[in-house]
């Protein structure tokens, strides 16, 4: 052990080769992990870390120190595996179609590109409109416009329903709506905006 010096790669490789059985022995204890080869790979990383950090002047042997390092690496891999266990992948199988072909989650989510662009464009437009409303309208005017045109994603409401919700007459909703729309047209023109 005293012949090993940090940076001596051939000595480290020799130590790794001679201690591979230790990794396999420790990895065999973890029967609930699905991929034994992965555990051996992770254990090898632990062994290399042990060899690189081992100090011979301590009362612990390399095998004892390496066992702890290997086990720590394997336990970290196990924790990570448990965290990932409930994760879904778009390629997880969910059944078969009428012809017996495997169906994956991604098969159920197929969307054409135009729909994605349209939804993104609509969201950006709604954001721009909301900013414009925040800058130029009172709270009551924003509520009125939101209800009448469904800017929050709700169905547009009739003048009567809007009037009832705001506690004003339907004719006042009509006049207020016209005034607010004119206010917005002026603001859009002044800010050189396009929607």
Image: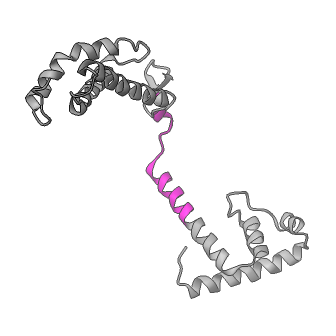
Compared to 10, does 134 lie above or below? below
Compared to 19, does 134 lie above or below? below
x then y, percent, for residue 177: 77, 77
Closer to us: 17 or 4: 4
Q: Residue at x 44, y 22 (%)?
A: 102
Q: Is residue 72 left or right of residue 171?
A: left
Q: Residue at x 32, y 26 (%)?
A: 69
Q: Residue at x 58, y 88 (%)?
A: 190
Compared to 8, does 151 lie above or below? below
Classify the position of the C terminus by image quarter.
bottom right
Q: Is residue 180 left or right of residue 82?
A: right
- The magenta region covers 104-124
x then y, percent, for residue 175: 82, 80
Closer to us: 150 or 11: 11
x then y, percent, for residue 110: 47, 40
In magenta stretch: residue 101: no
Compared to 113, does 133 lie above or below? below
Q: Quadrant of residue 167?
A: bottom right
Main SS of residues in magenta: helix
x then y, percent, for residue 151: 68, 64
Closer to us: 35 or 113: 35
């Amino acid at each position: 052990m005293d012949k090993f010096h940090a940076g001596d790669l051939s000595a480290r490789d020799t130590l790794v080769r001679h201690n591979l059985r230790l990794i396999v022995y420790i990895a065999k204890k973890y029967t609930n992990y699905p991929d034994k080869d992965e555990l051996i790979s992770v254990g090898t990383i632990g062994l290399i870390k042990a060899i690189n950090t081992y100090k011979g002047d301590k009362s612990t042997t390399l095998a004892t120190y390496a066992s702890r390092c290997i086990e720590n690496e394997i336990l970290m891999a196990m924790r990570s595996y448990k965290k990932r266990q409930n994760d879904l992948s778009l390629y997880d199988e969910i059944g078969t179609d009428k012809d017996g072909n495997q169906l994956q989650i991604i098969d159920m989510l197929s969307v054409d590109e135009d729909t994605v662009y349209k939804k993104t464009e609509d969201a950006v437009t709604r954001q721009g409109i909301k900013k414009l409303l925040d800058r130029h309208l009172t709270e009551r005017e924003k509520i009125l416009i939101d209800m009448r045109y469904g800017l929050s994603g709700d169905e547009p409401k009739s003048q009567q329903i809007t009037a009832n919700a705001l506690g004003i007459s339907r004719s006042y909703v009509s006049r207020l709506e016209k005034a607010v729309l004119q206010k917005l047209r002026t603001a859009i023109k002044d800010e050189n905006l396009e929607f």
